[in-house]
Structures are given as C-alpha cells and as structure tokens.
Image (spheres, rainbow, N blue to C red):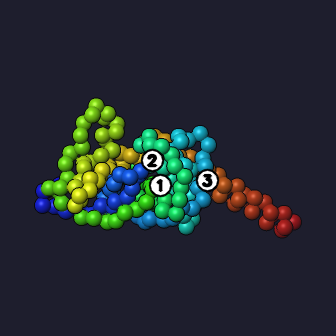
Amino acid sequence: MDEKDEEKYLMFFLEEEYYGIPILKVNEIIGLMEVTHVPRTPDFMKGVINLRGKIIPVMDLRLKFNMVERAYDEQTCIIIVEIYMKNIKHFIGLVVDKVAEVVNILGADIELPPQYGQEAEAGFLTGIGKVKDKVVMLLEIEMIVNCSEVVNLIKDNVEEELEIIEGVCKNGMDKKSKNIK
C-alpha cells in the first residue's frame, strides 16, 4: 500500500486489544446465534451456523490466537467474512468480543509487524496500524482461516448436506410411489 493510500478497516476487540480486518472482506456482522458443534474439530472451531439457508463454519478468534476463553455476552458477535480457497468464495464466521468501528488508515500509519521468531503467528498480521492514540493489529484474514481444518469442515458440511438432500429426495420419492400403488 502506498503511504498516501487509505484503506477502511473494521476494528474489533479481543481481550482489551484492537484488531482490524479490511472492510471489503466483511460480508456482515450478526449477533450470536445457535452454533451446532461439529465433532472432531479443533477447539477454536465452534461449529456451524445456518444463516438464511447457508451453512457457515464459525471460528472463535480468541481460541485461534491461544487467548483465554471467556463467556459470551451481549457484545459478543460474529463477523461473517468472505475468503477465497482455490478461487471459490466461502464465508466463515469469526467470533469476537465486540465490534468497535470502521476506520480509515493511511498507508503511512501502518508499520510492518514485529518478527519474534513465531512465523505462524506473524503470518496473521499484515501490519500494525496507528489510529489516533490506538494501536490496531491488522489481520490477514486468509492466513487465519485458510487452514486445512476449515477446508475440511466446509467440505464435510457440503457432503453432509448433499447426503441429507439425497435422503430426503429418495424418501420422498419412496413415499410418493407407495401412495400411487
């Protein structure tokens, strides 16, 4: 990003720290809703939600970042973001403590993330933004969610949905054919 360029970020909290993701990656922000647990997934994968007929995996960013888990409250929300895996658009929900605001950050106000020898952790950060007197950790959303667990979760859910649909169709056809006789 050029120093004069400006980009909009959605700022949110995890613990008492500010984090930001590019607003263009955000599809919507929703309140907490019932999350269906998916067995044999990592702890940070809370499960899936049915959002207007679309199955969306939900990840708790606190747990993904090895922070202490806390009880959800009225400010906890899910940010639905879009990511591309193998050139296919997917949606994933990110549970955050609370959403703060949308801000413009100039390229000149973004510094490279510090290198502490933790390549995997540093890979999540595109930079550190300065907004007024605040420090904002700017996240690379694809690096956070583009992991094999999410890919497998999406793939398994699609396959499961297809099996359910096939079963319903087959059972529906069986019932109709019995009624005809």
Q: Position of residue 4 (x, y in %)?
A: 12, 61
Would residue 8 appear left or right of 152 to someone viewing this image?
left
Q: Residues within 10 Å of mark 3 (few under 14, many from 20)?
A: few
Residue on which the image places disc 2: 62
**Quadrant location, the N terminus:** bottom left
Dot 1 amino acid type: Val
**Which residue shows up at 43% across the image and 60% down it?**
98
Q: Is residue 115 visible?
A: yes
Q: Are marks 3 and 1 in contact (CB under 8 Å)?
A: no
Q: Residues within 10 Å of mark 1 (few under 14, many from 20)?
A: many
Observer-side mark, 3 or 2, equals 2
Looking at marks 2 and 1 on the same chain, the residue that comes earlier in the sequence is marked by 2
Dot 2 amino acid type: Arg
Q: Circle 2 sits in a helix, a strand or a loop, which is it? A: helix
Residue on which the image places disc 1: 95
Q: What whole-number distance in Å separates the C-alpha atoms at marks 2 and 1?
A: 8 Å
Looking at marks 3 and 2 on the same chain, the residue that comes earlier in the sequence is marked by 3
Residue 39: image quadrant is: top right
Q: Position of residue 45 (x, y in %)?
A: 52, 46
Q: Are marks 2 and 1 in contact (CB under 8 Å)?
A: yes
Q: What whole-number distance in Å separates the C-alpha atoms at marks 3 and 1?
A: 14 Å
In the image, farthest residue toward the right: 181
Residue on which the image places disc 3: 36
Q: Residues within 10 Å of mark 2 (few under 14, many from 20)?
A: some
- Height in image: 121 above or below 175? above
**Which residue shows up at 18% across the image and 60% down it?**
106
Residue 167: image quadrant is: bottom right
Observer-side mark, 3 or 1, equals 1
Q: Position of residue 107 (x, y in %)?
A: 17, 56
Dot 3 amino acid type: Thr
**Quadrant location, the C terminus:** bottom right
